[in-house]
Image (spheres, rainbow, N blue to C red):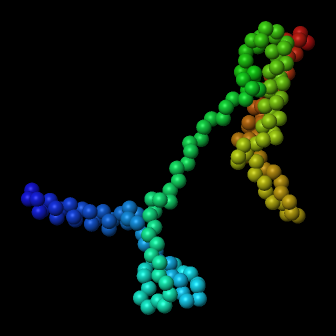
């Protein structure tokens, strides 16, 4: 290709990019301040304006946020004890007591500190609010209650009752 044709093709491609992708180009807004101090904004510069015109160059790419990726929360001590096999601490009854205590603590912690979105507050007709539990929260509480019942049964068996 002849260099001048290449240059013309490149210029045409660059022009097309600006026309078809306006979000890649900074936008200009105009801040208009009239003689009384009233501020208004315009996308186009005014023709016959008495006050001060301040061009504002807006870069849409500057208004972005990079959010952190969610991480798994660290395992609590009570969850570690719950995962322990029976008899891991030597005495089966003591291990069963530890698991029961951990299960009760995990259940109480879930009741006292629901995760975000698990309990919503809904307004009541006469005023005030009432809690509404999500289905996920109800399942989590039911699983923790089942862990407590299982730990209680393990303790009964370990104690020979």
In the image, 111: left or right of 16?
right
Q: Position of residue 89 (x, y in %)?
A: 77, 12
Taking the spot 38% from the left edge, 61% from the top edge, the residue there is 24
Q: Quadrant of residue 135?
A: top right
Q: Quadrant of residue 15?
A: bottom left
In the image, 31: left or right of 22?
right
Residue 64 visible (yes or no) = yes
Residue 95 against residue 138 in the figure, above or below: above
Q: Position of residue 70 (x, y in %)?
A: 59, 41
Residue 45 against residue 27 in the figure, above or below: below
Taking the spot 76% from the left edge, 42% from the top edge, the residue there is 114
Taking the spot 45% from the left edge, 67% from the top edge, the residue there is 58
Image quadrant containing the C terminus: top right
Residue lying at the far right in this picture: please name it: 161
Taking the spot 75% from the left edge, 32% from the top edge, the residue there is 143
Q: Position of residue 46 (x, y in %)?
A: 44, 85
In the image, 60: left or right of 138?
left
Residue 10 against residue 55 in the figure, above or below: above
Q: Position of residue 1 (x, y in %)?
A: 9, 56
In the image, 3: left or right of 157?
left
Residue 127 against residue 77 in the figure, above or below: below
């Amino acid at each position: 290709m002849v260099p001048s044709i290449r240059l013309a093709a490149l210029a045409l491609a660059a022009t097309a990019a600006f026309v078809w992708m306006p979000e890649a180009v900074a936008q200009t807004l105009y801040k208009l301040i009239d003689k009384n101090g009233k501020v208004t904004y315009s996308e186009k510069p005014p023709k016959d304006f008495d006050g001060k015109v301040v061009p504002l160059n807006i870069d849409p790419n500057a208004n972005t946020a990079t959010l952190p990726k969610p991480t798994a929360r660290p395992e609590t001590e009570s969850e570690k004890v719950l995962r322990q096999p029976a008899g891991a601490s030597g005495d089966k009854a003591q291990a069963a007591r530890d698991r029961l205590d951990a299960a009760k603590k995990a259940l109480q912690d879930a009741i006292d500190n629901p995760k975000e979105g698990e309990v919503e507050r809904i307004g009541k007709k006469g005023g005030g609010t009432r809690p509404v539990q999500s289905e996920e929260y109800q399942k989590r509480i039911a699983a923790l209650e089942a862990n407590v019942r299982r730990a209680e049964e393990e303790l009964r068996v370990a104690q020979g009752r």
